[in-house]
Amino acid sequence: MLRQEQIAEVINVQTEAFLQKESSLPREALEYIPVAENFATIITGIRRCGKSTLLLQLLRKSYEHALYLNFEDIRLVDFEASDFVRLQKEIDHRKLNVLFFDEIQLVEKWEIFVHQLLREGYVVFITGSNASLLSKEMGTHLTGRHLSMELFPFSYTEFLSYKKAKPNELTLSDYMQNGGFPEFVKTGQSLILSSLVEDIVVRDIAVRHAIREVNALKQVLVYLISNIGKPVSANKLSGTFGIKSTTTLLEYFAYFRDTYLVEFLPQFNYSLKAQARNPKKVYTIDTGLINVVSASFMDDKGRKLENLIYLHLRRKYKELFFFKEKGECDFVVFTKGKLGQAIQVCYEINDENFEREYNGLLEALRFFDRKEGIIVTMNQKDRFEKDGFVIDLIPAFEFLTR
């Protein structure tokens, strides 16, 4: 339990620091923040991807004043559900109608408080770094009362804007190697990324879920990020890293996904049971993390490029799969249940791999009765037309700026 003056002091200090933050590069997501009367706006994303900066940009664009409160402040460690009454008094005292809450899900019964604020006409924005913790409570008191969006690290176009650079093979290589975490892009300090991963694994996963075998947890993460673009299965990993239980591995996978460290792409199948049963391809939320986590000594540019294309599609689409029968197509994208695009990714098309990549894409197009497909490469451009099918080779730096 906190005293009234403690809450007031934290709000004062945090708001001052919040308003002094740099927000020079307008985030692309700023134009897509969902806002509606009597709805809370929920913005989730991995730590340090720029959620609070996005709120500041929103404030400067659309509002004159707002109350900002980050519940991860050490001074709020004793904040309890009963303290929401004191927080309400502060809000009333300051006569502020727009409220920005960061990581509010750390406090029990937060959703009841937010629901009350919405009933009273407040405009509420919530940011959080754990999608699962937010969604559990939103399924009760905030059902039908929230609008959600996700924020990612810098896209390639945002990266170019910050660097004041043009899309080409050189800038794409830079982005593919370093990723898009704003602070890392600005400073180049790799310690920022390694500390980020350590904080998430230890504080957000191990401590929160009472995991004792932290080394095994870290080994699983290293394995996953060392195998981006490859199918992974908890069943096949059972017994590895000293973890015998498949259930434990699946829990670890879920924790990594909920904190946005890695994501899992399902294989397309009309059967949802088959989708759940089949191995899923693993990708990381930012290619810069590969350099600080991966145990691979090979600089596999092809899989890094595939990861970049995944992230580009992931930002735009909800229905995303890989396709596999005799051959394989890296990505099939659906819009309202219908195939929108079939995309193959290959760093360099040559005589050795052309038939494999071309036929894998063609197989997907025939399966879905489509005539046009794309092969994304590092720098090659071409077009193939045969038997009514049109396959375009597109350099990644062009594809990522579409």
Image (cartoon, helix red, strand yellow):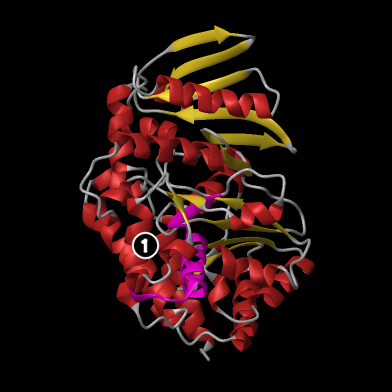
x and y percent of residue 91 in the render? 62, 72
User: Would you place residue 283 above or below residue 399 in this image?
Assistant: below
User: Would you place residue 216 above or below residue 146 in this image?
Assistant: below
x and y percent of residue 298 in the render? 23, 43
x and y percent of residue 293 in the render? 28, 56
Number of numbered markers: 1
- Compared across the picture, whether 186 is left or right of 151 comes to left
Q: Nearer the viewer, residue 92 or 172?
A: 172
Q: Nearer the viewer, residue 389 or 206?
A: 389
x and y percent of residue 392 in the render? 51, 15
User: Would you place residue 311 above or below residue 199 in this image?
Assistant: above
Is residue 310 something one can see in this rendering? yes
Occupied quadrant, residue 380: top left
- Compared across the picture, whether 390 is left or right of 70 comes to right
* Residue with the most extreme front position: 326
Callout 1: helix, strand or loop? helix
Residue for badge 1: 221
Magenta span of residues: 242-265
> Tag 1: residue type?
Leu
Crowd tier of the residue under label 1, counting other residues whose Cα lies within 10 Å: few below 14, some 14–19, many 20 or above: many
Occupied quadrant, residue 194: bottom left
**Residue 13 colored in magenta in the image:** no
- Point 61% across, 40% down: residue: 317
**Residue 261 colored in magenta in the image:** yes
- Point 43% across, 57% down: residue: 261
- Point 62% across, 9% down: residue: 387
